[in-house]
Image (tube, coloured by chain):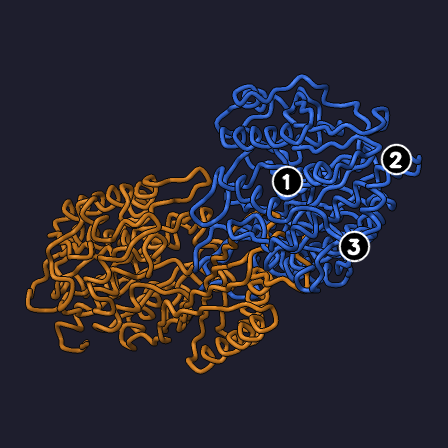
Chain colours: A blue, B orange
Amino acid sequence: MNAAQDLLQSTGRHINSDRLWQSLMELAQLGATVKGGVCRLALTELDRQARDKFVLWCEEAGCTVSIDGVGNIFARRPGRNPQLPPVMTGSHIDTQPTGGKFDGCFGVLAGVEVLRTLNDLGIETEAPLEVVVWTNEEGSRFPPCMMGSGVFAEKFSLEQTLAKTDVNGISVGEALAAIGYAGSRPVSGHAVGAYFEAHIEQGPILEDERKTIGVVLGALGQKWFDLTLRGVEAHAGPTPMHLRKDALVGAAEVVAAVNRAALGHQPHACGTVGCLQAYPGSRNVIPGEVRMTLDFRHLEPARLDSMIAQVQQVIDDTCQQHGLTFELTPTADFPPLYFDQSCVDAVRDAATGLGLSNMDIVSGAGHDAIFLAELGPAGMIFVPCEGGISHNEIENASPDDLAAGCAVLLRAMLAASMAIAQGQLAA
Amino acid sequence: MNAAQDLLQSTGRHINSDRLWQSLMELAQLGATVKGGVCRLALTELDRQARDKFVLWCEEAGCTVSIDGVGNIFARRPGRNPQLPPVMTGSHIDTQPTGGKFDGCFGVLAGVEVLRTLNDLGIETEAPLEVVVWTNEEGSRFPPCMMGSGVFAEKFSLEQTLAKTDVNGISVGEALAAIGYAGSRPVSGHAVGAYFEAHIEQGPILEDERKTIGVVLGALGQKWFDLTLRGVEAHAGPTPMHLRKDALVGAAEVVAAVNRAALGHQPHACGTVGCLQAYPGSRNVIPGEVRMTLDFRHLEPARLDSMIAQVQQVIDDTCQQHGLTFELTPTADFPPLYFDQSCVDAVRDAATGLGLSNMDIVSGAGHDAIFLAELGPAGMIFVPCEGGISHNEIENASPDDLAAGCAVLLRAMLAASMAIAQGQLAA
């Protein structure tokens, strides 16, 4: 254990920044787009090539690779004590149709770089380590998102998941078989000693606050709704204002209310109307119907419900005032999540030990770590992404920030391995 | 002239109410919707079928039919003196995407019924009569609206009009050729002795005041704009409220401002946002762009401009506040219009002579008559529509009110023909 303890006492990053960057750039060739992004949908031929590369790199790093029934790939580096549950890390290598080079891939390749660095330094950990590629995190080809980690955490049944189909009617099971990644390892029942996931922030906060590392405390709860407002469509000229039932005038009040509710429930509140369509959509016809989506996020369940109640009151009042009717349908409900305190501390201690500027942050988006947190202590490490832009071909991150995030991951995993060995970290 | 004078001295309607209604119902079959409305966009195959029917009916009524370069159809019934400029009537047979059976079609078929009635009575008029179908009054498929009458009145150039395209890139010229209505008659330079247009009110005033005939004094001025707001599209989860540039939040303030400005400039003020589209239109992506239309109407030019200035100020302030940019493009500008006094009097005298309850009224909508008023004396006849609802599949009007409006049209046209012959009506 001396080498690992020495590393944690030092101030050096130890990881090979160039090697990490080269691996990221090499993986990004598979599905590279002309605009500099990546299109590598889950379980396609390009995904197979990326998976093969990951497997090759992990085997070269001395790992044993196994694949489970939903195609999750586990690269295991033995520990001194094979009885201990593994310290895991990972993310995904599938992308959005117009995705970037870093979303997901950074977390996977930071894990690979941790393996390589430990080999370079000749460090043997107490607990085994595992680097995981989770199948279909994006959900772009096969909904829902976070599919592989969801099956691993028993949130989704394997059978139903394998039966999900893409727009062409191809099932997950068929696609897995076609690319040779329908594995035999059981999908569930595995102990998780700890799980860390490094990820670009996908938001602008770290850049705005000029911090290198985001210590992720948890993830916002989310509640989504579909809202339809109905009035009476009528000719825009001859219909006097006081006799109108204009669904768009009502919808505008709801958009303002969603924004106002989120501003009034800070910190950690988001409210978004992403879709809004007015019907019939003719410039001289008063809109008789508006369909819109509402997306509410908050870290505290009671505050999340308070935001929603505030907007529901506005919907009631607005419909009353403008003679409209409405239908409000819930479409998604994810409770807020707080990561394990010792994992959060391990990430913060690692950043501080490396002299990296850092701040506590909350994830507004979903990640595989959210499902892993149900199986064992989990934490996340965020690094800045340029302009806060992600799910976009121009997604970008600096090599130095990525290296910093990888160095934090190395330390957090080593610390967790020691804590597990000492019985100080338990699911 | 005795037969015509006799008719004007009588109190009978003379027109065939059932025949008018049957023709309206027959035309409404072309593009009939399940909700009882009509979807017959300009220059489609359905429009061709409706045009063919009009041409057939007019030829059966002994008219000579000619078609001009923008597809306007002129059915001419000879007068005793072919040197006199014609007394014209007409409207349109294209509809909104979810339109009704009467908007436009009533004016055209009331004109056809006038022809048929004169034939039945064996009345030869002094001046020739013309019943016209104006191309694309609605502007739903090809902006701008009132296209055919606008070209006839030299408000729009033929060349530019033929080059206008629909959302699929099909031009007006191509669409005209495809349905066989690219005619050879010159589009302009025709004398207009007088022009009358019968139309459903498309508003609730006549019904509310329990009057059968609206004597139309003039029309509200209209100014239309396309507004694009641009912010930054970003992931709805990880992008905190204070760092957003949400184009839809800005757009909602503009919708509210348009409504507020119209309410604050009563009477005779209307403000409508008919189209609003948010891009990219994904439920967990903050809208980076919104495209919307603004429609302002008022009877007084200065008050119209005051409404618009008030909204422009809100657009400036909103963009400043939310970090947006905007583009505001005028798309239509029709000044308020007062119809020719002798035509207005002819309509009122006809209603009074028939013992029909009537009131002076102002048109909130645009009509082909507004362009025709630039070429000669013009007037309009309104009849009630149920609930004031138009541009809607449930648009409805009573057979008796439509017959009353048609009888007023017959008298007004006969009176104008005599006035023209006597040199008492001049452009």
How far across and how far down the image is residue A1, in percent? 86, 38
Determine which residue is flagged by label 2. Answer: A420
How far across and how far down the image is residue B150, in percent? 25, 65
Determine which residue is flagged by label 1. Answer: A109
Who is closer to the viewer here, A225 or A204?
A204
Estimate how packed mark 2 is, as few (under 14), some (14 to 19) or many (20 or more) residues with alpha carbons within 10 Å: many
Rendered image: mark on residue A11? 3
The image quadrant of residue A414 is top right
Who is closer to the viewer here, B265 or A411?
A411
Q: Is residue B132 above or below residue A140?
A: below
Rendered image: mark on residue A276? none
Q: Chain of mark 2?
A: A
Tell me the element at label 2.
helix
Amino acid type of the residue that numbered disc 3 sits on in the rendered structure: Thr
What's the CA distance linking mark 1 and mark 3?
Answer: 22 Å
Quarter of the image with the C terminus of chain A in it? top right
Q: How many marks?
A: 3
Estimate how packed mark 3 is, as few (under 14), some (14 to 19) or many (20 or more) residues with alpha carbons within 10 Å: few
Let me know if residue A309 appears in the view.
no
Who is closer to the viewer here, A393 or A330?
A393
**Marks 1 and 3 on same chain:** yes
Who is closer to the viewer here, B100 or A310?
A310
How far across and how far down the image is residue B394, in percent? 47, 47
